[in-house]
Amino acid sequence: MSLADRAAASHTIHQGHGPLPDAEIIERHAEAFVHGFVEREAWVSLLVWRGTVSGRRRFRARLAEPLPLAAGRRVDVTARGERFALEAMRRLGAPEACVLVKDGLLEDELTTLQSALHRAYLSGSGALVSAVPGRLCFVQSADGTRQILYRPRETSPASR
């Protein structure tokens, strides 16, 4: 991933307070995914695993199972191709830099949106492609279910 892509990924989370290390960007995306899209009862069991190498491996393995997702906006892309998912993510505001958390990876990583979706579709394993922390992601489980989850940006009374 280029330096510009890393800076964009860092800015997506940290809004101008200087660049963050990759590991911190990845952890913030994972935590924001859980808090933004997973049922509250499952938060602790998912996040407690993220603190160690073996815990992150367990988190990735957990993606293979259908997760208890909170009610919200989603686009089912199970029957759609990779190109459709990529264009839908872009239309919903996905930047080119994102985080890939996938069952079978040795480490979670920063990568491009296109590469992350391509690798998720090819593998067929559990995957999370987090584009905007807590607001826009792609989730795939090993049973073949693929969804884009999104939450619109909250508007303040002053911006209305």
Image (cartoon, rainbow, N blue to C red):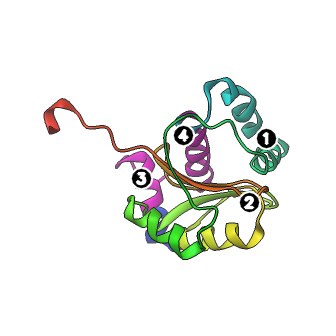
> In this view, which residue lies farthest toward the top?
41
- Image coordinates of residue 29 in percent, x first then y, are 56, 47
Residue 14 magenta-highlighted: yes
What residue does disc 2 label? 144
Tell me which corner region of the image, top left, top right, bottom left or bottom right, holds residue 51.
top right
Q: Quadrant of the C terminus?
A: top left
Give the Cα distance between marks 4 and 3. 12 Å
Give the Cα distance between marks 3 and 2. 29 Å
Element on which disc 2 rests? loop
Give the Cα distance between marks 2 and 1. 28 Å
Give the Cα distance between marks 4 and 1. 18 Å
Give the Cα distance between marks 3 and 1. 25 Å
Element on which disc 4 rests? helix
Question: Residue at left 78%, top 61%?
Answer: 125
Question: Residue at left 49%, top 65%?
Answer: 97
Element on which disc 1 rests? loop
What residue does disc 4 label? 32
Give the Cα distance between marks 4 and 2. 23 Å
What residue does disc 1 label? 52
Residue 125, above or below 38: below
Element on which disc 3 rests? helix
Q: Earlier in the sequence, mark 4 or mark 2?
A: 4
* Mark 3 crowdedness (10 Å alpha carbons): few <14, some 14-19, many ≥20: some
Kind of residue indicated by mark 4:
Ala
